[in-house]
Image: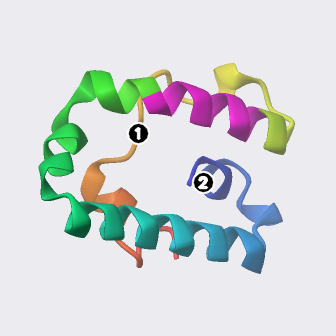
Amino acid sequence: MLKCQYQPERRTKSWDNTLSNCRNQIQDCLEDTPSLQRFLQDSVWIQKYYRPACRDAAKETQKSVENFPAECPFIIEQILDPSFLA
């Protein structure tokens, strides 16, 4: 999602497929284990996984990690919404 937002001119079908697949995997996990839902509202848990996502996005976009927000700019509804950043 960070790559799509911060480097839209380089967006490819592969990026779209990755977003779709990740969203599907999250939905599957939530269906299989509904108790995971509570983590999606936990800012500490979200930040734990957002930091490595920023590092990955920085490497893949060849931008500095400082170009990305320090805190996750997406709410869970956006992350799961297949039409967001579509």
Looking at the image, tell me whether mark 2 or mark 1 is earlier in sequence order. Answer: 2
Residue 82 drawn at (x, y percent): 41, 76
Residue drawn at the location 12% of the way across and 49% of the way down: 35
Marks 2/1: CA–CA distance: 10 Å
Q: Is residue 83 above or below residue 33?
A: below
Q: Label 1 near label 2: C-beta < 8 Å? A: yes
Quadrant (top left/top right/bottom left/bottom right) for the N terminus: bottom right
Question: Label 2 is placed on what type of residue?
Answer: Gln
Residue 9 drawn at (x, y percent): 79, 64
Q: Provide the residue designation for mark 1.
A: 73
Q: Is residue 46 left or right of residue 22?
A: left
Q: Which mark is residue 26?
A: none
Residue drawn at the location 64% of the way across and 68% of the way down: 18
Q: Residues within 10 Å of mark 2 (few under 14, many from 20)?
A: few
Seen from the viewer's position, the closer of residues 34 and 22 is 34
Seen from the viewer's position, the closer of residues 60 and 38 is 38
Q: Provide the residue designation for mark 2.
A: 5
What span is in magenta? Answer: 49-58
Question: Label 1 is placed on what type of residue?
Answer: Pro
Quarter holding residue 79? bottom left
Residue 26 drawn at (x, y percent): 38, 61
Quarter holding residue 73? top left
Residue 59 drawn at (x, y percent): 82, 35
